[in-house]
Each structure stands twice: as structure tokens, then as C-alpha cells.
Image: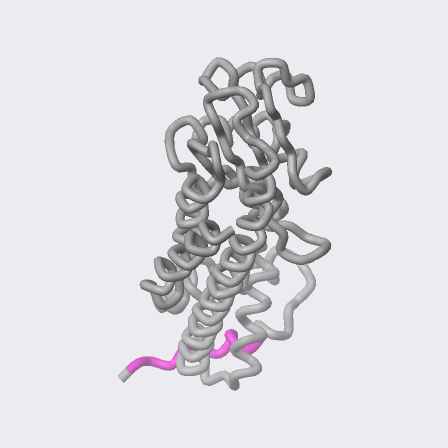
Amino acid sequence: MVHIAQVMCDVAAQLRTERHPPVQTTLEAITVAAVDAVPAAEDAGISFVGDRSQIQARAPTGERPRALDTLQDQLGEGPCYSAIREHETVHAPDVATEDRWPRFAAVASERGVGSMLTVRLHHTADSTLGALNLYASTPHAFDADSEAIARIFAVHAAVALAAAEREEHLEAALRSRDRIGQAKGILMERYKLTPEQAFAVLASISTGTNRKLRDIADEIATTGAISADPRDHRRSGQRPDTALTALDRPPQSRR
């Protein structure tokens, strides 16, 4: 256990070299450290639960986990899916004789995988960040000690990953807020609107064009222009939007 504690300290030190380590950097640090921490592990990858609960293959330590983690994503079967959806830990001691995921096991065996160990990465008690996939070239490579260490490692790794994900979401929200503020300022100056009217216009454009508000704001803040007249949906016979009546006045000329 001293060994895994040192590994996690090294990971923490590596992540501290960046002020706000992005999720991808954290994922890569986790997989590299996992190979060092878990006995018999030769390769590692993470099946990451992304937006809309899609499972993505991320941060492989080599070509074999890259191909096989991607294959699990494509097939919708494999130890990562079992770990995320059914069990905390999934052990495949002999991949060649594995019948739980026959399509995945056949390809994995052909690529030289003898055994696998997969551990869920918890976000909260009711949700998950993904699963850590560990690969070995020989059957029965992972023993009880490997499994115990992998579980402990996964707890610490999940904490680091959750922190990086929160930081990334916060930064994205702040960037979005800034862009919305810039777009509001452009509309306020050009059409002499109040802040409330400017935001209502952005929201109405978003609804009328079926685009995200932050994308509309980014376009206006970047180019100073709106690619399509936001009042077009009124002219097409749809319900008039009172938020856009402020745009009926002519834009103010810049001096």
C-alpha cells in the first residue's frame, strides 16, 4: 500500500504543474500511473462517460488499449460496459475462454490480451465517471492483490478526475458568460437596448434558429454580425416574438 500511496502522490505532483489541469491531462496521468501501480498491468485505458451518457475511449497507454477500448465503444459490450452498468469490478482471467462478451473477447484474444481487469470510477454513489481498463498479455495475470490495489487506485483517481471535470465545466461556463455579455453589449450599443432586452433578443434568436444561446453569443461577439436576420421567423408566419420588436429600429451608426 506504500507503493500506491507514492504513485498517487506522484500523480498529484504532476497535475499540480498545471494550474487547472484539463480532463484529458488528468485521464492520461491516471492511465500511466495505473500501469505502474497495479501488479501485472501492462497497458491501460479509460472508458469515459461523456455528454449524454456516451462512453468514449480515452487516454490509452498504447495502441492495444486504444483499439480495444474503441472496440468496446463500437460493440457496446465488454468489461468496461459491465463495470459501468452492472458491477464495481470486472475480472476476465482468461480472455480466450471468455463468454460474457464473445465478439469483444475474440478480437482481444487475437490482439494478444490474456487477461483484463476493469474497475469503475465513481463520481457519486449514484453516478459514474467511467471505468479503468487494465490489460495483461498472459492469462490469470491479475490476482487478489491486483484487484485490491486497482480498487484503491480507482477511488483516488476518481477524485482527481471529478475535480478536473468540475474545473473544466466552470471554466466553460465562465467563458460562455463572458461571450454572452459581449454579445449583449454589441446589441445594446447598436440598437440602444437595455441589458434585459438584449438578453431577450439573444434568447429569441436561439429559439427561432434552434441553436444554442452560447453559440449565437459567440458568433455575435466574434464577428459583430448575425448571420441570419433574427426576425425572419416572424415574417414566415410564426408567432411574433415581442423580444425582437426592439430590433425594428434602425441600427445606430458607429462614429
Residue at the outermost left position: 255
The residue lying toward the viewer, choosing from 180 and 173, is 173
Does residue 42 sit above or below 132 in this rendering? above
Determine the residue located farthest toward the front in the rendered image: 2
Q: Quadrant of residue 63?
A: top left
Q: Main secondary structure of the magenta part?
A: loop
Residue segment shown in magenta? 245-254
> Is residue 143 shown left or right of residue 42?
right
Q: Is residue 59 above or below residue 216?
A: above
Q: Residue at x 41, y 42 (%)?
A: 36
At horizontal 48% and vertical 37% (from top left) the residue drawn is 39
Q: Which residue is found at the position 68% from the left and 42% from the top?
A: 88
Give the total number of marks visible in the rendering: 0
Residue 105 at x, y percent in the picture:
58, 19
Residue 253: within the magenta? Answer: yes
Q: Quarter of the image holding residue 210?
A: bottom right
Between 193 and 48, the one nearer to me in the picture? 48
Q: Tell me which residue sits at (54%, 76%) in the image.
A: 199
Looking at the image, what colour scheme do you see?
A: one colour
Residue 24: x %, y % from top left = 42, 50
Q: Relative to the observer, which residue lies in front, 115 or 78? A: 115
Q: Quadrant of the C terminus?
A: bottom left
Q: Position of residue 174 (x, y in %)?
A: 47, 71
- State the image coordinates of residue 82 (x, y, percent, origin top left): 67, 34
Q: Quadrant of residue 240?
A: bottom right
Q: Is residue 133 magenta?
A: no
Relative to 141, does residue 56 appear above or below in the rendering?
Answer: below
